[in-house]
Image: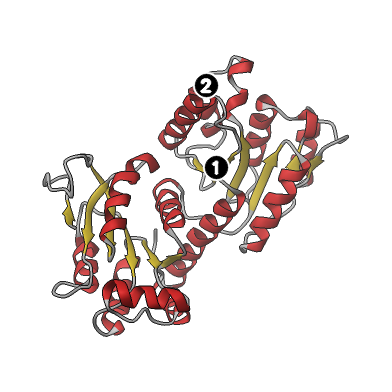
Amino acid sequence: MGIYNPKGHIGFTHRLPQVSGPVAFISQSGGLASMHSHIGIFGGYNFSKVISLGNQIDIDLVDFLNYFRTDPDTKIISMYVENLKRSGNKFVQLLKETTKDKPVIIWKGGKLEAGHSAVKSHTGGLAGNIKLWKAMARQTGAILVNNFLELVEMIQTCLICKIPKDRNVAIITGGGGPAVEITDECEAFGLKIPKITKESQKKIMDFIPEVNSNLSNPLEFGANGGYTNMIKVMKILNEEPHLSTILTTINPGWYPSERINIEDVVKTIANTISQDSNKNIISIFNSSRARKESIDLIDEFYQKTREYNIMVYDSAQAAAKSIYRLWSYGVYLKNRGYKK
């Protein structure tokens, strides 16, 4: 497929956006390079460059990683990798030199037996043992993902979220079932759900009764929930020093019936966290696209949350995986004395 460079007006097709952005993508699949180039804008980001390098017969993955390492237009490097053409030592060394300044997100293709065969057929190389790739990621600070959706989610997370100082998450939801699901997924992927302080619980009890509610964490309000109370709770949680992430469930379909403007909702949520706070606000979207009105609202909701640096995930699992991976990257940087 070749090169997609919006700044240089070079593209795979004439339909690609000519707006440059901070994300680079290196791909051993022309189809995935083309798909990502078209889909990225719907994920809220544009590309500095996209490279389709195929079977690396001349220039290889190491060459392009070395280029993007110092490319001023690139802030995040993502890649789809099937195999390495030359020794992995150079690749590992370059990753170590790169991740101290820029996140490197790797989607490794051909992880299992059938995938190994597919890689050999596709690019004529050996896929390599996935255990070795996981060990390499731990040693270099690279962020390893499992599929295209996780690649997109991780790029969005790196663009929008601050690196969490710890794994502590506060969960706000209006129902007991969602609270259990989100808690399970967070703990399954290595995050922690600590209790909030007694002082904060008392403040919340001033406007939400204990009956039919859980006010410790996860915070589950039942019939006592709603937009206004959620905002009050988030402002209280902003004062909790042991929390790095506030996770809430939001249904954009509710707000028109309450005569609330979507942008006002998102702006108010964003402003519950002080500007100098190191906390992230993330959300799990749980609305339906069954009606045309819902589709329009959802599209506006995604657009506005990106503008106000609120990361929205489609599932609890996606949220938990992405935040844990970003925290792990931060731990790697901290342990080696790098500041981010």
The Cα atoms of the two marked residues, 1 and 2, are separated by 26 Å
Query: Of residues 148 and 335, which is closer to you in this image?
Result: 148
x, y percentage for residue 325?
50, 61
Residue 29 visible from this viewpoint? yes
Q: Secondary structure at mark 1?
A: strand
Inspect the image, locate mark 2, and give the three-letter code of the amino acid beneath it: Glu
Q: Which residue is at a point 68% across and 34% down the rendered structure image? A: 233
Q: Which residue is at a point 16% across and 48% down the rendered structure image? A: 11
Q: Quadrant of residue 33?
A: bottom left
Q: Which residue is at a point 47% across and 25% down the rendered structure image? A: 296
Query: CB atoms at circles 1 and 2 under 8 Å apart?
Result: no
x, y percentage for residue 228?
67, 24
Q: Which residue is mark 1?
A: 281
Q: Which residue is mark 2?
A: 293
Query: Of residues 162 and 68, which is closer to you in this image?
Result: 68
x, y percentage for residue 279?
54, 46
In the displayed structure image, the side of residue 233 where residue 86 appears, left or right: left
x, y percentage for residue 215?
78, 41
